[in-house]
Amino acid sequence: MKHRQINVFSLAFLDVMFCGFGAVILFFMIINANTYERREKINYVAKGEVRKIDLEVLEGKKYLVELKNTIQNLDNQLVQTQGHSKEIIVNIDQSKQQLAQQRQETLAKLQNINQLKTDLKSLDEAHQRLEGGATDAQTQGDKLRYFAGQGQRQYLTGLKMGGERILVLVDSSASMLADRIINVLRFRNLPAEERLRAKKWQQVLYTVDWITTRIPPTSKFQLYAFNETSSPVYSADNSQWLDAGNVKHLNFSVSSFYKIAPENGTNLYNAFKSIAELSPLPDNIYLLTDGLPTQGKSETLSTKVNAKQRKRLYRQALEKLPAGIPVNIILFHLEGDPEASSEYWKLAQKTKGAFFSPSKDWP
């Protein structure tokens, strides 16, 4: 029996294959249709986001342009402000220069005014002295100079003006500028014309003026000023002593003393040493000071000198004072020197002189 050959590619097989292929195509078409719809939705959403971002970018570009314009405006304003600043700085510098120039001119004018006042005062004092030198027996008696006090005040001091040779020794150190140490420190750095107007020094000047009006015309006299050194304020004819009967000598001595501005420290040793160098020696001394010395024979102490050091320097100075001469003390007040009054009172008592401490409105 003859076997029949089997054909795998029969009609039934092909039908099955085509049916399966068709099912695959159908499945693919179904899936692809959903994918397209989903893709369209995604694309639509993405396009919306893109349009939104484009709008934001556009707005950002507009804002960036506005910022650039603002920055440009600010740069322009900055340039203008810098220009104004430079102009203002130039104006300020010019104003400062003008102000400095005006201050210098004002200071120069003030100095001129002060100098004119000083000259006027000197002329007035010289005029008064010349009037005081006139011979008027009814008003002046034997006085060659005149001193105008306040009202009808009596000058009761206990000071006896007499002797053949009278020495007026005046402290012209910086402490004579004020009663308080703090004011002394303030005044001593001022110009000379300001120091001359110090209230305490003005009282000293008036006191010297008052003393010279009471020097007998038959006496010899000399006016010394001392601080760190001691010297006469006026000399004439190469003589150590001046003639009190000569009005010129009296007036020139006082005028010269009125030009001295207090300065530096107080060296009483040199002051008493200058007395010992006079020949012949004085027989009456008037010492005007405000305290014990701050300097001595061979040392210059610091500005801070305590009471013990002052007393030691004072005792050292007494060694140079010639013996047997009355010393009349006129002591002006100075704070911080409590032992000055007692020490100078003892000196006046020991030498048979007088001790006097004037009030602020004397003479």
Image (cartoon, helix red, strand yellow):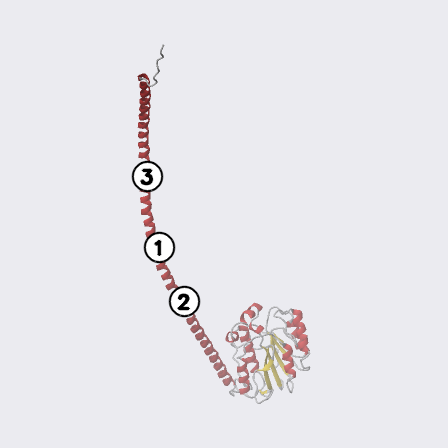
Q: Earlier in the sequence, mark 3 or mark 2?
A: 3
Above or below residue 279? Residue 39 is above
Above or below residue 260? Residue 54 is above
Q: Mark 3 against mark 2, which lies toward the viewer?
A: 3
Which mark, by number, is residue 272?
none
What x and y, as percent, mark residue 195? Answer: 53, 74
- How much space separates mark 3 and mark 1, taking CA atoms? 35 Å
Count all numbered tags in the image, as a single digit: 3
Which mark, by number, is residue 50?
3
Reading the image, the residue beneath label 1 is 74
What x and y, as percent, mark residue 181? Answer: 58, 69
Reading the image, the residue beneath label 2 is 93
What residue is at 42 percent from the left and 72 percent from the top?
101
Number of other residues with Cα within 10 Å of mark 1, as a class: few under 14, some 14 to 19, many 20 or more: few
Query: Relative to residue 82, is residue 139 drawn left or right?
Result: right
- How much space separates mark 2 and mark 1, taking CA atoms? 28 Å
Secondary structure of the residue carrying numbered label 2:
helix
For residue 326, which quarter of the picture? Answer: bottom right
Q: Mark 2 against mark 1, which lies toward the viewer?
A: 1
